[in-house]
Image (cartoon, rainbow, N blue to C red):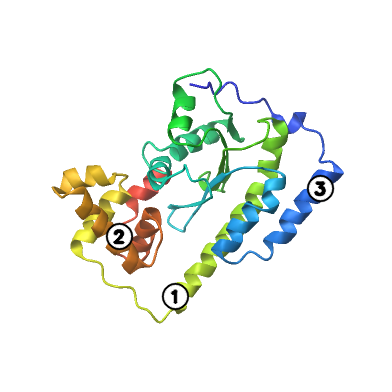
Amino acid sequence: MLMLAAHQGRHMNNASDLGDEECGHLARILLASRRVTLRHHFFSWVHGPVQSLIPHEILLCGVADESGCLLHERFTACRYFKDDHYHRVIHPGHGLIHQLAQEWHALGEPRMIPAPHDETGGWHTRLVDLELKNVAFHGLGWLDGQMKGYASFSRVRAPFDSRLAMYIEILLPHLLATLARVLANEARTRANSTRPVGLITAREVEVLTWVRDGKTNEEIAAILGLSMLTVKNHLRHAMKKLVVRTRGQAVAKAIALGFLRAQAIRSSAE
């Protein structure tokens, strides 16, 4: 495993000021963010202007809601990064994001893991297995010391040096604020919709409870004595009724509506 001790020193102390070209890129990124109100706007923004400073193929990011639950999102056009990879990465118990968040708490600065060369095992094996190749992760802390949000860039086509770390530190608060605006806009749209949220069944609540606790579909099937297909169908029906796109959003929405308690997922986020 790549040792925590190889954590780049205090990169902000070693990095020089932004040059004119870099300042120009940063200005364009910030100005373009003002037009981001919808999900597809955000996708175009991170795969457009943001690429000038952080060229990447996969962006995973999340913001914590009022209960402390991290709402994960992905913005990627990489055809190799599948749903299974995504759910394994955001698993609240042993997922990659959970471990990166722990190491970020310990370091207090971006966690940078470049692509492997001849090394095997540890982080490099996981990054290759998950089709991420490399990862540049940074979090945003809050007054209570807990993580308020994070961004994780992968398949980054730039040197993993102090400049990249500086770009991420500068852009992260603005990126999360822009994402929060998109999610808030989506929430308002759903609230103003005339289509009522369908009543989810007791079995769907049961499946969502185990999703909240970090279980995979295979594990849920074994626990409930159901087939994998049945579990997937229950989850798909619940997501459709709750008008959400991901498992994590389904859990968060079910908690907000009072179908689930937030205790397990909040403790995982902490």
The amino acid sitting under disc 1 is: Ala
Estimate the spatial distance between the alpha carbons at disc 2 and disc 1, rounded to whole Å. 21 Å
- Dot 2 lies on which element? helix
Q: Residues within 10 Å of mark 1 (few under 14, many from 20)?
A: few
Determine whether 163 is above or below 34 in the image: above
User: Is there any visible trace of residue 240 in the rendered image?
Assistant: yes
Front tag of 2 and 3:
2
- What residue sits right under mark 1 in the picture? 191
Mark drawn on residue 23: 3
Residue in view at x 83 percent, y 45 percent: 21
Amino acid at the residue labelled 2: Arg
| Residue 106, position as x, y percentages in the image | 53, 31
Number of the front mark, 2 or 1: 2
Marks 3 and 1: in contact by CB < 8 Å?
no
* Percent position of residue 246, x then y: 39, 56
**Mark 2 lies on residue:** 236
